[in-house]
Image (cartoon, grey):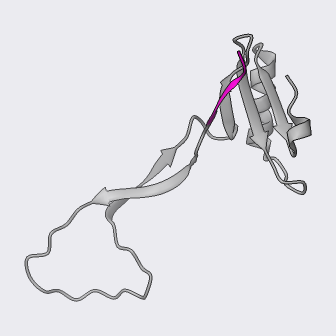
Amino acid sequence: MGHRLFRNNSGVGWAGQQVRVARSRMVMVHPGDVVIRSARPLHAGLAEGSSDLIGLSSSGRFLAVEVKSLKGRTTDRQESFIDMVNRLGGIGMIAKSVEDFHV
């Protein structure tokens, strides 16, 4: 049986209060603006710096792959996540091509 990898989407969005407007009022907005009342950030993903692909190797070890373009650079947090995975017995790597993926 092969490896099982899943896309770990991450990012930040905004959540806030829905407000129903009962009467007209004036506010200044510009084209493309979105207004969110009582806004708060909503973080998505496993953890800050977690890899793009996570899952299990065919031997059952945790697998984390940070995918980058040929010129792409990892952040310090991404490198720390890969190091942690490897220290704890998982398989962590950075792949800039299919050939870089080795387990």
Question: Does residue 89 belong to the magenta stretch?
Answer: no
> In the rendered image, is residue 94 in sight?
yes
| Left or right of 78 on screen, residue 98 | right
| Left or right of 57 on screen, residue 102 | right
The image shows residue 59 at horizontal and vertical percentages of: 74, 10
Determine which quarter of the picture holds residue 26.
bottom left
The image shows residue 53 at horizontal and vertical percentages of: 68, 36
The image shows residue 13 at horizontal and vertical percentages of: 47, 56
- Check the picture and name the quadrant holding the C terminus: top right
Name the residue at 70% across, 15% down. Answer: 1
User: Which residue is at the front of the view, 34 or 7?
Assistant: 7
Name the residue at 73% across, 15% down. Answer: 58
Identify whether 71 is placed above or below 23.
above
Identify whether 8 is placed above or below 84.
below
Q: Residue furthest front?
A: 1
Identify whether 30 is placed above or below 11.
below
| Left or right of 69 on screen, residue 3 | left
Determine which quarter of the picture holds residue 92.
top right
Look at the image and give the residue range highlighted in magenta: 1-6
Question: Does residue 3 belong to the magenta stretch?
Answer: yes
Q: Residue furthest top?
A: 59
The image shows residue 54 at horizontal and vertical percentages of: 66, 30
Identify whether 33 is placed above or below 69.
below
| Left or right of 51 on screen, residue 101 | right
> In the rendered image, is residue 50 in sight?
no
Name the residue at 55% across, 40% down. Answer: 45
User: Which residue is at the front of the view, 99 or 48?
Assistant: 99
User: Which residue is at the front of the view, 47 or 102?
Assistant: 102
Determine which quarter of the picture holds residue 6.
top right
